[in-house]
Amino acid sequence: MIDFRYHIVSLISVFLALAVGIVLGAGPLENTIGDSLTGQVNQLRQEKDTLRAERDTFRRARDTERSFVDYAAAELLADRLTGHRVAIIALGTVPDDTVRAVEARLRQAGADVTGQVTLTGKWTDPDTAAYRKQLAASLAQDLNPAPADATTDVILATSLAQALTGADGDLATLDDSAKNLMGILTTSDMALVTKSGDIKVPADALVIIAPPVKAGAAPSSAVQSARLDVVAAAQAASHGALVVDGARGKGSLVDAVLADPTLVGTVATVSGIAATSAQVTVPMALAAQLGGKPGHYGQGDGETVLPPTVRPTEQTQDDQ
């Protein structure tokens, strides 16, 4: 009986509280609550309108900047790389629009883009280490010059660089050693490299594009070391190498180059490649590199914004 009365009292209390709430909400508190909600809705609407206006302003500024950079690029890049042959090396999966943008700016500067290659995952996969070691022993026979006491990664990097730059005496075609090196690297189900089209013309400059760093997935020290070996080999085999990367920070290849006491003074870099201005900087930086003025360009520490105005001389047979 006591439990029953307890439940009856509890139910009555709930209904009384509900009734009081209804009476107050429909009476003295009605206007206060309504005004408060209306004020909050109006404030949110104003904030939304402000954010939309700021977004539109940002988009207009961005589009204006892109239009200006595109317009200025024609004069900035004119004949910067005329007479030079450039090959592109992607150190992994790089977005197609990034590669196309870099290639387009190189061509706008007068360069002949001889081809593009991409390193497959097998280039650094621990499971293919034994295969790479065996392959390197075969590739070393065609290297000229061959690196002394080189590791597997160095031999592979040197092979790739020479496969893209090895020229016959007339500079018009790749020499037989270069063709053989490229064939070994790109053939079979265990290919370490894929190529875009048939590469027939030797390059005198190499542009290396680093794949974007995924959040929380920076490359291991072994992978980064192998990539630096490619950068060093590209510089050694060509008249000038340029590293192109995304944002600076953990896993950035540009950061790794700037931290390397040898590469920092010999290899040029451009960071922030997603920006139109950085894409235009690529041929300017490469021209300065070929002109003997390597630099590092971007918005981060150790970088400058604009490369110097350099138009390197065309490659000749005497230069090879």
Image (cartoon, rainbow, N blue to C red):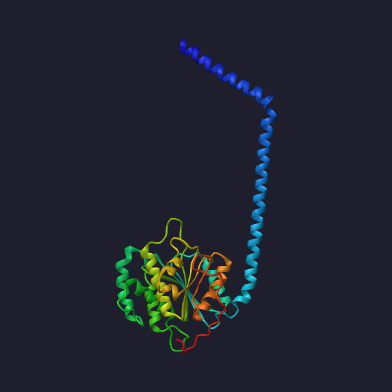
- Please state if 261 lies on the left or on the right of 83 as rendered: left
Task: Measuring from the top left, give residue 193's x and y in whole percent.
Answer: 41, 70
Instruction: State the residue in front, 135 or 219.
Output: 219
Relative vertical location of residue 179 with respect to residue 36 in this rendering, above or below: below
- Left or right of 33? Residue 101 is left
Q: Quadrant of the C terminus?
A: bottom left
Q: Would residue 15 be visible to someone looking at this image? A: yes
- Nearest the viewer among 109 and 93 is 109
The answer to whether residue 183 is visible is no
User: Residue placed at 46% from the left, 13% from the top?
Assistant: 3
Identify the residue shown where x is 38% and y is 82%.
Answer: 177
Percent from the top left, x then y, of residue 295? 50, 74
Residue at 50% across / 78% down in the picture? 293
Where does residue 313 sit, x and y in percent of width and height? 53, 85
Quadrant of the rendered image containing residue 141: bottom left
* Location of residue 251 with respect to 181 vertically, above or below: above
Residue 207: x, y in percent?
48, 74
| Residue located farthest toward the front when viewing the structure as drawn | 302
Position of residue 143 relative to residue 6, above or below, is: below
